[in-house]
Amino acid sequence: MKKVFTLFAAALLLVACNQPKESMKNEAIENIMTRVSVREFTGEKISAEQIDTLLRAAMAAPSAINKQPWAFIVVTDDELIAKLGEALPYSRCSNHPACAIIPCGDLSKAIEGEMGAFWINDVSAATENLLLAAHAMGLGAVWTGLHPDMNRAKLVQEMLGLPVHIIPLCVVPVGVPAEQPAVKDKYKPENIHYNVW
Ligand SMILES: Cc1cc2nc3c(=O)[nH]c(=O)nc-3n(C[C@H](O)[C@H](O)[C@H](O)COP(=O)(O)O)c2cc1C
């Protein structure tokens, strides 16, 4: 009897621990906490309106001095998506995405001088917004890196005919998910330091 009670108490405790905190019972927070990289897609196309929403979300990101030093290439052409997949196996473009969005830095809009490299932070913020928006819309997406790997970035520059001042940061294949990867719990209290190290 005592054993049954202990087991019951342990089960109750487990359920209680897995309840989201009050501050996490919010749609936006829930969306952030449940986003995962999706690398397999059904091949189904998505609408122009959905793509528009993704791009608006990306461009809502913060940027240093509000320079917005970005440009987005939306690759919808299946042949071009397949070519990206062949040239860049890690981009997951061979896995039937509806499109591939390529967030780029526009150096002509970047801060002049040594602070110019802030474009990487700015375009990264835009990319994360894009990923979160895709997830909120029931779509799947994954950030696949180009910059600072100059070989990968150059391949994309040439394939898509980008002018020299447009630097592709990453390739984000987007589509209807054909997989549902488990959410990863990455919270580590030891990563946090209050006030001083
Ligand atoms: C800068 C950067 C580069 C990445 N490059 C790749 C990549 O080339 N291919 C890929 O499949 N995933 C890539 N990822 C996705 C990561 O593997 C993924 O975010 C990480 O494993 C955590 O998983 P999650 O996104 O599901 O939380 C990249 C992510 C970042 C931020």
Image: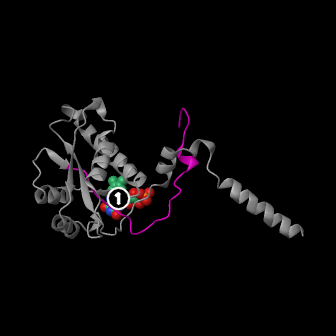
Residue found 17% across the figure and 40% down from its top:
107
Q: What color scheme is it?
A: one colour
Q: Is mark 1 within 8 Å of ligand 1?
A: yes
SS at circle 1: loop
Q: What is the total number of numbered labels drawn onto the structure image?
A: 1
Please tell me whether residue 191 belongs to the stretch shown in magenta.
yes
Rendering coords of residue 79 (x, y %)? 16, 68
Of residue 98 and residue 111, the one placed in the foreground of this image is: 98
Q: Main secondary structure of the magenta part?
A: loop
The region drawn magenta spans 168-197
Residue found 39% across the figure and 63% down from its top:
38
Rendering coords of residue 3 (x, y %)? 85, 69
Amino acid type of the residue that numbered disc 1 sits on in the rendered structure: Val
Rendering coords of residue 113 (x, y %)? 19, 32
Which quadrant of the figure shows ligand 1? bottom left
Q: Quadrant of the N terminus?
A: bottom right
State whether residue 140 appears in this view.
yes
State whether residue 147 appears in this view.
no
Please tell me whether residue 128 belongs to the stretch shown in magenta.
no
Task: Tell whether 111 sits left or right of 38.
Answer: left
Q: Is residue 23 above or below residue 65?
A: below
Q: Is residue 73 above or below residue 38?
A: above
Residue found 18% across the figure and 31% down from its top:
112
- Among all residues in the image, which is located at the extreme top? 65
Q: According to the image, label 1 marks what residue?
A: 142
Rendering coords of residue 88 (x, y %)? 23, 65
